[in-house]
Amino acid sequence: MKVFIVYCHPSEDSFTKNLRDSFIKGIIDGGNEYVMSDLYAMDFKTDMTEQQYLRDAKYENIPFTEEDVLAEHEKINSADAIAFIYPVFWTEAPAKLVGWFDRVWTYGFAYGDNKKMKMLDKAMLLCIAGTPIEKLEHFGLLASMKKVMLGDRLFNRAKQKEFVVFDGTSRKLETRENNWDAYLEKAYEKGKNFFADAGETFTVDDKFFTAIENSESGEVSDKTVFCYHQKGNVIWAEYSGGSIVKGFLIGTMDEDHNMHFNYQHMNTDGELRTGSCDSAPSVENGKLRFNEQWKWTMGKEGTSVIEEI
């Protein structure tokens, strides 16, 4: 099977370059193949033209003609999976990679009616961060990075998504040298087991759900979107939409992947509603669902079903 690697770093004197090489070695040793776009080496053009902007802004499904973008489209559709390898610059990917998305994720290819981009089996992001992960999590920066990459750019374009952070790699920190070999080994294993690992880990982290069924006494609907997060057996989510102005839930997931949590939200009538819920997973038509039994704090009970978007 083939992995399309989008690599973005301005220097060959970097930990990111070494990690890239270990990942590629793993891909090859795993019996798979790869094709790579090294954006800096290619001097990939990041600014879209006015013509491209107007084409996408007006949702014009007319043939795309810029050869460098068409080449990237071909690499995507000739691969089974995609991997992005890049460092964090100010809580974001380098401008060149952001520009790659701006130009390559075009209307009619990555989104829109009759889009031509295939559904990829897997997408992996290998993100190299100078800052320790504890700080990224404490200030919500990691969640922001993942929401942009997984929740927007990759969203429903791959069957499985994985965000891997190699943190504490700043040249100022001892962790850079202390973790060097372990990180390269981890990258190698990620490459070697790229397809073997597909589907093995059950998680709701960075998944989006909406309600497809609900009791009359419930308040969520198909206009309500839940964004779930998970760390170990702890799960939490934010939700809003429909009659929900803003809501939060927090709880745990057991070894059978059942979720148990408390929730609270403010509805459009200005009422604060709270309750508890138990959710059991199932898969329907390839989509993850949770069949829920919930109870308001004030007493009424009901059932609902949420489905992955």
Image: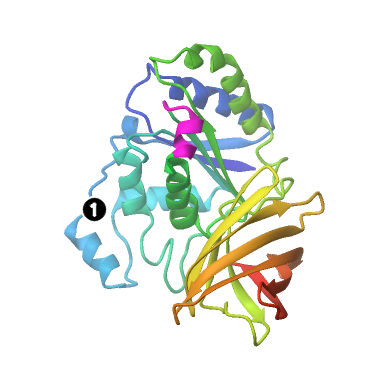
Could you tell whether 299 is left or right of 161 in the image? right
Kind of residue indicated by mark 1? Met
From this viewpoint, which residue is outermost toward the left?
50
User: Which quadrant is the C terminus positioned in?
Assistant: bottom right
Could you tell whether 93 is left or right of 283 in the image? left
The location of residue 181, given as percent across then percent down, is 58, 15
Which residue is painted at 43% across and 45% down in the image? 145
Could you tell whether 132 is left or right of 210 in the image? left
The location of residue 230, given as percent across then percent down, is 62, 48
Hey, which quadrant is residue 189 in on the image?
top right
Which residue is painted at 32% across and 62% down in the image? 64
Q: Which residue is mark 1?
A: 48
Hey, which quadrant is residue 188 in on the image?
top right
Residue 22 vs residue 304, the one in the foreground: 304
| Local secondary structure at mark 1 | loop
What is the span of residues highlighted in magenta in the rendered image? 130-138
Q: Is residue 133 magenta?
A: yes
Q: Is residue 267 visible?
A: yes
User: Which quadrant is the N terminus positioned in?
Assistant: top right
The location of residue 130, given as percent across then percent down, is 41, 25
Residue 256 vs residue 128, the one in the foreground: 256
From this viewpoint, which residue is outermost toward the bottom?
216
Q: Residues within 10 Å of mark 1 (few under 14, many from 20)?
A: some
Which residue is painted at 50% across and 16% down in the image? 175
The majority secondary structure of the magenta stretch comes to helix
